[in-house]
Image: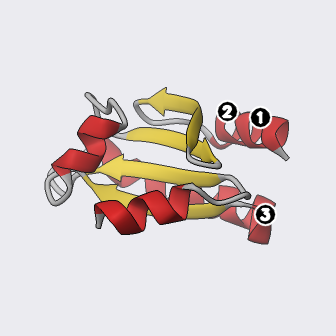
Amino acid sequence: MNRRFNRIVNSARPVLVDFYADWCVPCRLMPPILKEVKEQFKEHVRIIKVNVDHFPEIATSCEVRNIPTVVVFLQGKIQWSGKGVQGTSDISIALKELL
């Protein structure tokens, strides 16, 4: 997964990564927010989810210490991150700056 993850986030288009865990109650609030973001940005942004329990090495390499955490990558570099439940508007503002 780590090699695949690196290939995905090295994209020329922004990649939004939702770091979560199945047991995390606040993490369950993110899917409808991410769905709104996806509808707003369509093919301009790729959204993926990473379960920190299944892929702790990816979470560690991205310095994720709290969940949920949303991280936006562009060409392999972290451009923005938000810890805790992020609103659609905060994520949208960050993405618009990259497009």
Element assignment for label 2? helix
- Residue mark closest to the camera, 3 vs 2: 3
Mark carried by residue 44: 3
On the picture, is 47 further left or further right than 31? right
Q: Residues within 10 Å of mark 3 (few under 14, many from 20)?
A: few
Image quarter where the N terminus lies is bottom left
| Amino acid type, label 2 | Asp
Task: Quadrant for residue 89, please give it.
Answer: top right
In the drawing, does residue 77 fall left or right of residue 43?
left
- Secondary-structure class at tag 3: helix
Q: CA distance from mark 1 to mark 3?
A: 14 Å
Q: Nearer the viewer, residue 65 or 5?
A: 5
Q: In this figure, which residue is indicated by the disc labeled 1?
A: 93
Crowd tier of the residue under label 1, counting other residues whose Cα lies within 10 Å: few below 14, some 14–19, many 20 or above: few
**Is residue 1 visible to the viewer in this orientation of the structure?**
yes
- Kind of residue indicated by mark 3: His
Report whether 83 appears left or right of 56: right
Q: Position of residue 10 (x, y in %)?
A: 58, 56
Asked if residue 81 is positioned above or below residue 24 in the image, the reply reads: above
Image quarter of residue 9:
bottom right
As rendered, which of 4 and 56 lies closer to the eye? 4
Does residue 33 appear in this view? Answer: no
Disc 2: which residue: 90
Q: Amino acid at mark 1?
A: Ile
Q: Earlier in the sequence, mark 3 or mark 2?
A: 3
Residue at image position (63%, 64%) is 46
Q: Residue at left 68%, top 52%?
A: 14
Q: Between marks 1 and 2, how big is the CA–CA gap?
A: 5 Å
The x and y percentages for residue 3 are: 35, 64
Which residue is pictured at 31% across the width and 38% down the height? 61
- Confirm or deny contact between disc 1 and disc 2 (CB under 8 A): yes
